[in-house]
Image: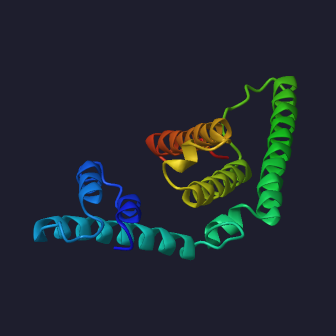
Amino acid sequence: FESDSTSISRFQSAANIEYLKSISRSNNNTAGLTDADLRTVNEIARSRRHKKRSQRERIRMTDVKGGSFLQKITNSRYYEWISGGLILANAVFIGIQTQVMASKTKDLFEAGIVPSSAESAWVVVFEVLFCLGFSIELGLRWGSDGFFDFFRGADISWNVVDIVIVFFSIVDLLFLMSISIAGGGLHRVE
């Protein structure tokens, strides 16, 4: 020990602080400590060193500039552009899909034919691709932030909205598939 006051500050253990303070008042060295006391103090010191070592290892595993490899990817400008592009492409797709369905329904109605509610094959393919893309994007961000830390950051509300949207997209596709299979094939898809 360097001195009893530094040893006390080093071994901040709730169970041993008062005992070490009393020893530091009575002795200026460790001569008054028994073998059991020295073992307790050494265990505390070993625990502290292990904790600091594991903290240094965690810091070493991440880069000073911004985190792990996955965090670097999800925090990069290109990832943001790709995510924004995916959202924009999905919005354009929904607009085109709505226009095509409205035109098709209008033409069938004018011809006196009852329009069917079957999805076109190209619509289903794009829905699956967008759902897969959004699921991967959400999974990468969730994996980057950590399972629980994903819900602790400043973007918690956006993260919850993303989870809800992706969840219901998956449910929608599973519902479409189950109806198609229950109906004896892909009769819901034209």
The colour scheme applied to this rendered structure is rainbow
Locate residue 99: give its quadrant: top right
Locate residue 24: give its quadrant: bottom left
**Residue sitting nearer the eye, 159 or 33:** 33
30 horizontally vs 179: left or right = left
Count up the numbered dots. 0
Q: Where is residue 29 in the image (x, y as percent from the top left)?
A: 28, 70
Q: Which residue is drawn at 62% across and 44% down?
A: 153
Q: Residue at x 52, y 56 (%)?
A: 146
**Residue sitting nearer the eye, 108 or 12:** 12
Quadrant assignment for the N terminus: bottom left
Q: In this view, does 7 lie above or below 153?
A: below
Is residue 186 among what the camera can see? no
53 horizontally vs 86: left or right = left
Q: In this view, does 154 lie above or below 15?
A: above
Q: Which residue is drawn at 64% across and 67% down?
A: 67
Q: In this view, does 10 lie above or below 178?
A: below
Is residue 170 among what the camera can see? yes
Q: Where is residue 124 in the image (x, y as percent from the top left)?
A: 67, 49
Q: Which residue is drawn at 60% across and 38% down?
A: 160
55 horizontally vs 12: left or right = right
Q: Where is residue 97 in the image (x, y as percent from the top left)?
A: 80, 41
Q: Where is residue 117 in the image (x, y as percent from the top left)?
A: 67, 32
Locate residue 73: give its quadrant: bottom right
**Residue sitting nearer the eye, 54 or 132:** 54
